[in-house]
Amino acid sequence: MKKLICVLISLMMLLGASACAEPAPAEKLFTPGTYSAEAQGIFVPVKVQVTVTENEITSVLIDATGETPELGGTAAGTLAESILNAQTPNVDAMSGATVTSKAIIAAATDALQQAGADIATLDAQRKDTGAGTGEKEEKIVDTEIVIIGAGGAGMTAAIMAKQEGKDFVLLEKMPYAGGNTTKATGGMNAAETHYQKEQGIEDSKALFAADTMKGGHALNDPELVAELANSSSDAIDWLDTIGAALPKISFSGGASVNRIHAPEDGSGVGGFLVEHFSAKLEELGVSILYNTAATELMVDAEGKICGVKAEGKDANYVFNCKAVILATGGFGANEEMYTQYRPDLKGTVTTNAPGATGDGILMAQALGADLVDIEQIQLHPTVEQSTSMLITESVRGDGAILVNQKGERFTNELLTRDAVSAAELEQEGQYAWIIFDQNLRDHLKAIEKYVKANLTKQGDTIEALAAELEIDPATLAKTLSDWNEIVKNQRDTQFGRTTGMNADLTTAPYYAIKVAPGIHHTMGGIRIDTKAQVINTEGKPIPGLFAAGEVCGGVHGGNRLGGNAVADIVIFGRIAAQSAFDYLK
Ligand code: ADP
């Protein structure tokens, strides 16, 4: 589905006729012509072609094919425009696409140097200083519902609202949709689904609820958890109806039975859902108002929601409305906010999308919303630190082990995320190596992404891999042979692991990725009830205000199980929409 992302912006289009009035710099900056260069992005080399006259960059063509479509593609467009505006390659990286941005900047620098440019001179003469100081247009829009945030929860609510024939707007502060939802790799937990029945899996909603409470250390709100479990099979049916079926069922940490539902083709659930939700919205004729951040919720004299203020790129808005659905996600990308509640997490890398800055929580708090479990922040134990890329739980679920720098296992790798993260932090250097073999690679599509991104180390024998990792070869070889014996006997006498033991690690070549904990999910947030109504500090609903997804607290308690974030956004996104419709009646 990776499509060619090419961006060509002509300087004349940008500057218009008035550019002719500017005197050309006397100094010759370039040898006229077209020059190309490339630099490694996350997955592939990014190609940049620049065309220059003697003293102007007149076009920038960026080919970011193969980078993540949401971020890489947006970065290509944004940076081509910035380089043309600034007339230097040294422009700001796009947040959330830093690696792709850096590759674009490096390739543009190279191409311009081939054209004879002195980059320091271009920097000294940069043209974008003082840009963007013009007055913004003020717009007033009347609508019924404002949905804030186009991640999984917001898009779910928007599809429902359109199907119900409601008048609404969907705001997204980033230039693309998807938020943290895009990053969900595993699947969606649901019980008593038709897929489970067809595949002979016995499960119950009560067991799903019990597993979720246990996983969350019983800190969860039992009513929200019951709602999550009871509505889960309906949500799976609803996904079927919009062409986003999740028929592939497997095991995920903390579940008593196979319950996590994923796309048929093995692709990551988040990207799959965002792609299908976007397609459905397009089919329904819904356009997302991008680059537009909600900044304030407005209430009337009776305390009922009556509007939203938002700041867009070219205009500021007041949306007059009767109901608001907050779907702004969590605050895992806002270091100031998470260290306010958890000072111990200062400096920890985050896997979160750049829009996860807690805006919805702050806006709701300003209206007196209550917060729950706000200090409950989940670390994911397998995050590659240089790219913040999450190594999906499925790698361990399919049989990988974790070893420390001594080459020894140190935990049951499939304990809950908080427990595995804590065990890793006790190891020397506070990191681990995740070890797997060719057989596992052959069966898990996600691995190709890690190999392409150069995150994997490889060896034709375990000893050769150990040498790559600077681990004692004999120790790693013994760890692997002990592990293969454990798999054979289906008995982990060392750490009591009972799952993810269907295949041993005996097929060369062998692989390793260096991982450490990263901030992954903010479990706490706004207090809601089972109707997704936002509850204030006096225990009463704020009339007209609904919330769904990671912006809320209570569903996951002290630890979120893999597969429950996607369940949360689809289930409560639907409930929030339905409650808003009922409220409007
Ligand atoms: P969830 O999983 O709960 O749907 P996501 O992180 O997937 O959460 O999506 C939340 C979305 O909300 C992101 O795309 C984010 O950029 C967007 N967002 C966050 N704050 C605002 C805001 N103030 N205005 C508009 N959109 C916002």
Image (cartoon, helix red, strand yellow):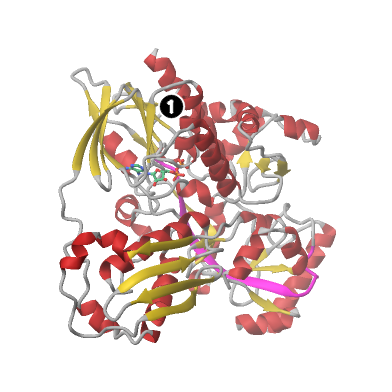
Residue 271 horizontal/vertical position (percent): 56, 49
Q: Please give left or right for residue 26 compared with residue 328 in the image.
A: left
Residue 246 horizontal/vertical position (percent): 67, 39
Q: Please give left or right for residue 181 compared with residue 34 in the image.
A: right
Q: Tell me, yes or no, whether the highlighted magenta stretch contains residue 528.
A: no
Give whichever of 338, 487 is nearer the camera: 338
Q: Please give left or right for residue 208 compared with residue 423 in the image.
A: right
- First to last magenta residue range: 504-524
Give whichever of 459, 327 is nearer the camera: 327
| Ligand 1 quarter of the rendering | top left
Residue 443 horizontal/vertical position (percent): 75, 59
Amino acid carrying mark 1 in the image: Ala
Residue in view at x 72 percent, y 74 percent: 510
Q: Quadrant of residue 208?
A: top right
Taking the image as drawn, is residue 530 in sight? no
Residue in view at x 58 percent, y 39 percent: 214
Taking the image as drawn, is residue 274 in sight? yes
Q: Which residue is disc 1 drawn over? A: 532
Residue 486 horizontal/vertical position (percent): 79, 62
Residue 359 vs 439, above or below: the answer is above
Give whichever of 312, 95 is nearer the camera: 312
Q: Quadrant of residue 167?
A: top left
Q: Please give left or right for residue 306 compared with residue 417 in the image.
A: left
Instruction: Give the SS element for disc 1.
Output: loop
